[in-house]
Image (cartoon, helix red, strand yellow):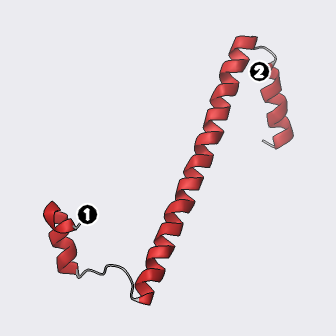
Amino acid sequence: MGAPSLDHEFMQYWSKLTLVEKESLLNVAKNYVLLKEEESDLTEIRHNIIREEREKYLRGEGASYSWEEVKQMAIDKEKRNGL
C-alpha cells in the first residue's frame, strides 16, 4: 500500500472521529514519535560513550581489567570499585 492510498484511508477513518477522539489519537501519535526520538538519542549517547571508552583504552588511559578481575567483580560487588 503506497503512502497516498494509506493517507487517504487514514483520512476516511479520521473524518469519522469526534474531536475528543482525534485529540486522544493525536496525543498517542505525539508520544510515540517523542519516545522514538528519545530512544534514538539514548542509542547515540550510548554509542558515543562506547567510542570514548574505546579511544581511552587505545591510548592506554582509564581502567583495564583482566578476565579474572571481571569475573570477580561480577561475583563480588565490593570489588567493583564504584563501577
- Residue under circle 1? 82
Residues packed near mark 1 inside 10 Å, few (<14), some (14 to 19) or many (20 plus): few
Residue furthest toward the bottom? Answer: 59
- Which amino acid, by three-letter code, is at mark 2? Tyr
* Mark 1 element type: loop
Q: CA distance from mark 2 to mark 1?
A: 55 Å
Residues packed near mark 2 inside 10 Å, few (<14), some (14 to 19) or many (20 plus): few
- Residue under circle 2? 13
- Which amino acid, by three-letter code, is at mark 1? Gly
* Mark 2 element type: helix
Coordinates of residue 71 in the picture (x, y in percent): 18, 72
Q: Earlier in the sequence, mark 2 or mark 1?
A: 2
Coordinates of residue 26 in the picture (x, y in percent): 70, 26
Q: In percent of the image, x 81 and y 43: which residue is there?
A: 2
Task: Name the one closer to the observer, 16 or 82.
Answer: 82
Q: In percent of the image, x 50 and y 74: which residue is there?
A: 51
